Image: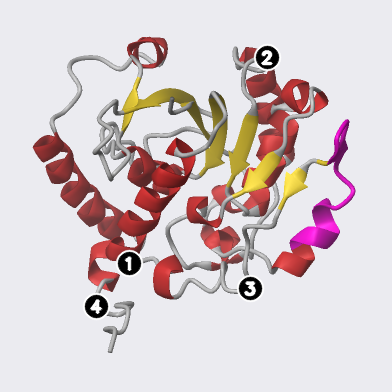
Amino acid sequence: MAPIVHCVRHGQAEHNKGGEAYFIRDPHLTEAGVAECRALESRFPFQSSIDLIVSSPLRRALETALCSFQPAIARGVKIVALPELQETSDVPCDTGSDVSDLEREFSDKQGPLGPVIDLSLLDKDWNTKKGKWAPSSNALLARARAARQWLKARPEKEIAVVSHGGFLHYLTNDWTGIGAAEHASAWENCDFRTYVFSTDDADEDAVLMETEQSRVARGAAGRIPSKEEQESLYLKTMQMWEDRGFQNPLKLNEKFEEPAAN
């Protein structure tokens, strides 16, 4: 049976202050971000039931995972860094650190069963923002699908996933709620939502569906948009990102196109 998935956006990091802060490479959480994680730790109702934590390998996501899920970590739950969960753009703040740097930085994080963070899924190219890691729409849709397939195949029953405001829209295929002028995402810092996978065994896209309990808890009103309506919202979001000075992944498809196989 496919696991239940609790998706979480990271806490406030240095780049969230905007302006020149976007040029900070792989920024850390701020003091306010740590406080947000502590608050998430208190209000997250599944600390005793999650049996895996999966995180983007960007520092702010790993730090959020470490800070927000201490009760689960104290039980021996591990954090697996999954490169597919990294943020969408190739600006410095969304570009990850080299594996060797992450190993040095997080090697001292120990739980009851040894090292807490597993970086074994990261290869030397994970932070290049090229090929399958590119910020183009084609690449983002492909790695969101790959992330869902990986999660669906896991043997655990309940998983917490820590990612980013932009990529969580790709992961969940939910493009509703993006409206506030200062945001590029409908996900606030340390938001969490709960999903289940489609029960269709032939579903190769591994579709995630938000539970009704999760929708009610966050005040989502009305019916869930259809696939066609979500596609329309997606196109509107891409234009909105461009209008607000963010990358439009649709316009990067040609630039980052993978070479054709011979």
Give the residue at mark 1.
136
The reply to whether callout 2 and callout 1 are in contact (CB within 8 Å) is no
Give the secondary structure at mark 4: loop
Q: Is residue 243 magenta?
A: no
Q: Residues within 10 Å of mark 4 (few under 14, many from 20)?
A: few
Q: Secondary structure at mark 3?
A: loop
| Residue 206, image quadrant | top left
Mark 2 — residue?
A: 48
**Badge 3 vs badge 1, beta-carbon distance below 8 Å:** no
Sequence-first disc among 3 and 1: 3
Residue, x 13% and y 30% (percent of image)?
226
Looking at marks 4 and 3 on the same chain, the residue that comes earlier in the sequence is marked by 3
- Residue 142's place in the image compared with 222, above or below, is below
Mark pair 4, 3: CA separation: 24 Å
User: Who comes first in sequence, dot 2 or dot 4?
Assistant: 2
- Would you say residue 105 sits in the magenta stretch? yes
Q: Amino acid at mark 4?
A: Glu
Side (left or right) of 90 relative to 38: left
Identify the residue at horizontal 48%, vertical 28% (top origin). Answer: 5
Residue at 28%, 89% in the rendered image: 262
Of the residues under marks 2 and 1, which one precedes in the sequence?
Answer: 2
Residue on which the image places disc 4: 254
Q: Secondary structure at mark 1?
A: loop
2 vs 4, front mark: 2
Q: Amino acid at mark 1?
A: Ser
Disc 3 packing (10 Å; few <14; some 14–19; many ≥20): few
* Mark 4 or 3: the one toward you: 3
Dot 3 or dot 2: first in sequence order is: 2
- Tag in front: 2 or 1: 2
Q: Which residue is mark 3?
A: 124
- Front-lying residue, 16 or 102: 102
